[in-house]
Image (cartoon, helix red, strand yellow):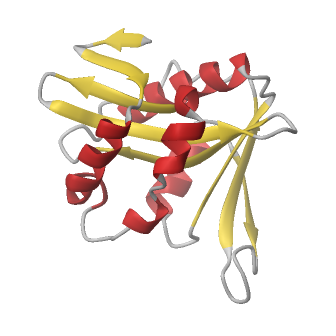
């Protein structure tokens, strides 16, 4: 558990998952990414699905898991509209990396669409290498794939 600036980062509960879906526009704006939110991740990989909670609710979250090959895979990371630019995304990634390492991860991986320039810039600022892969999600469905070794030190923005 990580606590800083009145925000506590803890493993997500199923109730948190449902609250995140209810508040989906606060995290994703006009993009409807609810279909990517899988409650099975919280059920099966609870220690690597984390929420950042303040007195006024969930400010951000990161959902991921560790593969048998030792990769900490980040499936989703989001911060609420009133928490962007505060360093919360970095803190969530740090907490995830620590949890993933406890489960044997030696590296991190994430993906996004090539059009998601904000996510690409964010991951690069965390030291991830970026590779664009054609047909990753099927024919004509390219993605940006991020990789980096652990440990993750993102103490400075």
Q: Quadrant of residue 150?
A: top right
In the image, residue 66 sits, relative to residue 139, either above or below, namely above
The picture places residue 45, in percent across and down from the top left corner, at 59, 35
In percent of the image, x 35 and y 10: which residue is there?
3
In percent of the image, x 48 and y 62: which residue is there?
36
Q: Is residue 36 left or right of residue 124?
A: left
Image quadrant holding the N terminus, namely top left
In percent of the image, x 24 and y 37: which residue is there?
83
| Extreme residue toward the left, this view | 56
Q: Is residue 94 left or right of residue 103?
A: left
In percent of the image, x 41 and y 21: which residue is there?
10
Which residue is more in the foreground, 116 or 3?
3
Is residue 120 among what the camera can see? Answer: yes
Which residue is more in the foreground, 138 or 46?
46
In the image, residue 85 sits, relative to residue 24, either above or below, namely above
The picture places residue 67, in percent across and down from the top left corner, at 78, 41
The picture places residue 17, in percent across and down from the top left corner, at 35, 44
In the image, residue 73 sits, relative to residue 8, either above or below, namely below
In the image, residue 33 sits, relative to residue 73, either above or below, namely below
Query: Number of callouts in the render?
Result: 0
Is residue 87 among what the camera can see? Answer: no
Q: Is residue 26 left or right of residue 91?
A: left
| Extreme residue toward the right, this view | 69
């Amino acid at each position: 558990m990580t606590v800083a600036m009145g925000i506590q980062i803890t493993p997500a509960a199923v109730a948190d998952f449902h609250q995140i879906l209810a508040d989906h526009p606060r995290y994703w704006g006009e993009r409807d990414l609810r279909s990517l939110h899988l409650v099975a991740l919280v059920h099966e990989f609870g220690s690597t699905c984390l929420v950042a909670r303040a007195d006024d609710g969930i400010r951000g979250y990161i959902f991921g898991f560790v593969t048998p090959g030792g990769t900490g895979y980040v499936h989703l990371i989001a911060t609420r509209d009133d928490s962007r630019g505060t360093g919360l995304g970095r803190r969530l990634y740090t907490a995830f990396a620590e949890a993933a390492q406890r489960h044997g991860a030696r590296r991190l991986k994430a993906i996004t669409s090539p059009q998601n320039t904000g996510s690409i810039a964010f991951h690069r600022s965390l030291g991830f290498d970026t590779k664009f892969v054609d047909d990753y999600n099927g024919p004509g469905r390219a993605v940006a794939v991020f990789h980096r070794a652990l440990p993750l030190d993102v103490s400075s923005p």
